[in-house]
Amino acid sequence: MTTLTLGPFNRVEGDLEIQLDVADGLVREARVNAPLYRGFEQILQGKDPRDTLVIAPRICGICSVSQSMAAAYALADATGVAMPPNGALATNLVLACENLADHLTHFYLFFMPDFARPVYADRSWHAGTETRFRALTGSAAGEVLPARAHFMHLMGLLAGKWPHSLSLQPGGTAKPVQAQERIRLLAILGAFRRFLERETFGDSLESLAALDSARALDAWAARDPGQGDLRRFLLIADDLGLARLGRATDCFMSYGAYPSGGTRLFRSGLWADKRPQPLDLAAIAEDVSHSWMVRGGPLHPADGVTIPDAEKADAYTWCKAPRLAGAVIEVGALARQLIDGHPLIRDLVAESGGNVRNRVIARLLELARVLMAMEDWVKAIAPGEPFCEQIAIPDEVSGTGLVEAARGSLGHWLAIRRGRILNYQIIAPTTWNFSPRDAAGVPGALEQALVGAEVRPGETTPISVQHIVRSFDPCMVCTVH
C-alpha cells in the first residue's frame, strides 16, 4: 500500500488536497481535505440581518448570485414576504444566468482540457481534442469566452453588475425591467441559443431536451458524429469508460429550482433506493467528528455551531460532514434532473448510476432546458407591474433559504434575536459532495467515488482522479465557512 497526496488542483475553484491509499494500481481509500478556513458564519454574527445581502455573496466570486438568493430567501422566509410575479421571474433569470455560465465554463475550460493531455496521445480522438480543448490554445476557448461574456450582459441589465450584485432582495429585485429591455434580453438569449446549438450540441435545444433514454442518446450521437462538442465528449466517454468511473452513493437530493407562480421549474425531493422519495429537511445534520471544529453531536444547521479547533485529533479537513437521516448525499445537476424526472437522466442512472459521464451529460442537458425556460420567463415579465415588496424584519425570528446553485443544493439557516443575527449557518453544494467521514467512519460522496480509480505507473496526480474530482465541479471557497 502506498499513499499519494494530491494538491493543489488546477482548474478547481479554491484549495483542495486529497490523500489516496493505493494498492495494485487502484485507489483503495481516499480522504478529501478542504484546507482553507473562511469564517463567514462568525463574521455574520451580531450583524444587522440585512447585512447578509452584502456579506454572504462575498463567500464566492463565481457563484455569488446563489449565495445572494439563499440569503434573500432566508430573510423572505423569516419575514413572510412573497415576491410579486415579476420579481420571481427576474430573480430566476439572474440565478439561471449565473448557473448556465458556470455550466458552460466548467465543460469547456475546466473539464474537457484534461482529454487533451499527452497521456491520451494514442487515442484516435486525441488530435482533434487537443486542437479543440487544449488549455489556453484550443479553439473552443476563443469561441466560448466571447459567447459567455455576451450572455452575461443579461446580468448587467437585470442585476446591475456581477458578481456581488445588491439588486436581489427578499421581496424580489430592485431593478425593474422596461419594455425595451425585454427586447434586449431576448436578443441576448437568442445569441446564446445560437452558440449552443451550433457549437455545443450541433442540434436544437428542443431536440436535446426531448431525448428520453440512453438508447435515444446513442442514436442521436451516431446520427451526426463530430457535430457539436457534446458528441465529441460522448465519443471520449465511451472509449474511456467514463460511465464506470466515479460512482458514489447513488443517493441524490435537490431543494428544487426556479420557483414561480406556485411551482418550480425543477422539483424538490430525494432519490434513494432507486426511486424518488419525499425530502425531509428536518433530517439534515452536520457531523464534525473528522472536521477541525469543536466537538459536538450532529446538529441540524438551524442549531449549528461553527467554532474552529485546528489542533483537533483525528480531523483532516475544515469541511463538515452533512448527512440526511445519516445518509451520504450527492447534489448537483445530475441530482436535479434525476429528481425532476427527466427520462434520459432516469434511464442513464438506472443503467450506470452516478458517474463522470452522467454528471457531465446532466449539466449540458440543463443548459438546454433552462435556456428555453429563460426565454419564457422574459416573455412573461409585465413591465410597469411591481418587481419588489418591502419587508419588515421582526426582532425575534428564524428563516431558511434554500436554492439550487450550479453545483447543487445550497442552504442558509438564519436566527435573529433582538434585531441582530444570533446564528447563521451555511451548507454549500461542495460541503455535501466533498464531506469527510462521519462518526460512523462512512466516507463522503467524493471519497467513495474515488475508490477503484486507476493509478497508472509513475502517476503522481492520476488522470482518472482528476476526471472524477472535476465531474463534481467543486467550489472549495464555498465549502467551508
Image: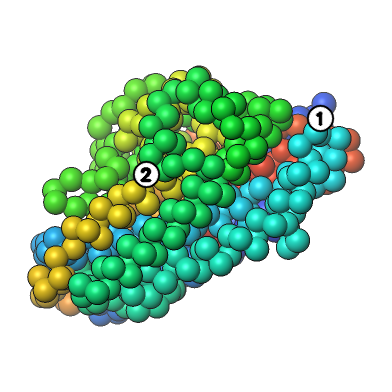
* Amino acid type at mark 1: Gly
Within 10 Å of the Cα at label 2, are there few (<14), some (14-19), or many (20+) other Cα atoms?
some
328 with respect to 401 (left or right): right
Q: Mark 2 points at which residue?
A: 369
Give the numbered dot on residue 213. none
Please tell me which residue is depicted at 81% across the width and 30% down the height of the picture.
25
Please tell me which residue is depicted at 13% across the width and 48% down the height of the picture.
262
Please, what secondary structure does the residue beneath circle 1 have?
loop
Q: In this view, does 428 lie above or below 465?
A: below
The location of residue 212, given as percent across then percent down, is 40, 26
Please, what secondary structure does the residue beneath circle 2 have?
helix
Q: Mark 1 points at which residue?
A: 25
The location of residue 323, given as percent across then percent down, is 41, 41
* Amino acid type at mark 2: Arg
The location of residue 376, given as percent across then percent down, is 25, 53
Please tell me which residue is depicted at 77% across the width and 49% down the height of the picture.
130
